[in-house]
Amino acid sequence: MSDELSLTVNNTKISGWTEVRVTRGVERMPGDFEIGMTELYPGELDEVVVTPGNSCVVAIGGDTVITGYVDRYVPSFDANSHQVRISGRGKCQDLVDCSAEWANGQISGASAAVVATKLAAPYGIGVTCVETGLRIIPQFNLMLGETPFEIIDRISRYSSLLSYEETDGSLVLARAGTLQHASGLEEGQNVEAASVTYSADQRYQTYRAFLQAVNTFQEGGEGGNLIATTTDSGVLRNRKKYIIAEAVAGLIDVATQRAAWEMNRRNGRSVVVSVTVDSWRDGDGMLWAPNMLVPVYLPSLKLDRKLWLISEVTFRMDENGTHAELVIMSPDAFVVEPTGLQYGFVDGATFNSQ
């Protein structure tokens, strides 16, 4: 299977790139790329005609990896060579860069999927969400100047969803993935280099969720203000984390979830594995993809066989060869933060099947 990277602009496919870096991730919005080519023969690059703002498709072999726009085109030369470098991002860049368009500036009575679809529509971006039972968004007001993605990120967290870009440039709302790659990452097989970062600085022994920051229940102790307490037995010394509910009325359940979320997510992110493999594809020929599970076996790092979730994938080609760089973590690291939409609003949240 050919893994040559091509850039299609204005119905013209350009290949033969000598430097490639394409990155996608569940916490990276949007996907982006930077590619370069050096002229081997005089006039060879004259046919590379690219204008910033052009729509483009980046593909590896027959698989699309980014659908978006060219951001920058940089031709250059020196005494010995002539080069071209092109960088760009997926279509969801418009959700990150531009201001949100929403009639009357008020949102209410819709799920995160419906709201995201309406915010993405002016920019020609589709939205996919297969999750069911989403919370209905209570009424809240948009602030002038907010970007669509700032709002989408907020309502996604309220609905416990990840929001990231698909290869066709659409927006995906999803929870941590359950699909698994056909083959894994194994020392002595396809792993060229690996490292693991163990951290304790962001973990706490006790997590406490409070109703409000100023304790007006002092005469009765913390009982009237304290909502929930969660303890991490893996942290041996006294380290406390106090969490204040984002909204007061009706969100005690969300604040309770926050205490458990803080502990689980911080635990999940206390072990981050970075792996460099010798191919852009798994054993079945599928490109490595974010939000996919992958079995990992790295005995030199004392990591036994275990399923991890891919957070980010970078496809790279340069003078050092062709590699895929993967950042992987425990699926617990991607449990999305339950959060209120704004301070002080009364949550009339209900659930539906959309």
Image (tube, rainbow, N blue to C red):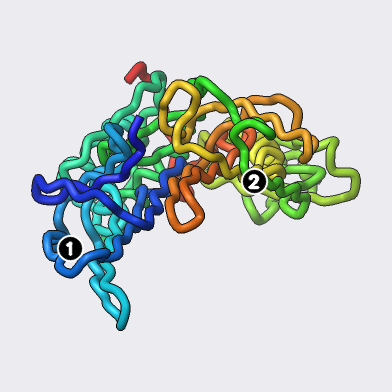
Horizontal and vertical percent position of residue 230 = 75, 35
* Residue 350 in sight from this viewpoint: no
Is residue 186 visible from the viewing direction of this image?
yes
Residue 145: which numbered mark, if any? Answer: none
The image position of residue 287, as x and y in percent, is 41, 32
| Residue 205 quadrant | top right
Q: Looking at this view, name the residue that lies furthest to the top.
A: 353
Which residue is under mark 2? 193
Please give the name of the residue rendered at 9% of the width and 45% of the height, measured from the top-left corner. 11
**Residue at left 31%, top 31%?**
113
Residue behind mark 1: 44
Q: How far apart are marks 1 and 2 (CA)?
A: 36 Å
**Mark 2 residue crowding within 10 angstroms, few (<14) / some (14–19) / many (20+):** few
Pointer 1 with pointer 2, Cβ within 8 A: no
Q: Which amino acid does label 2 sit on?
A: Ala
Q: What element carries label 2?
A: strand
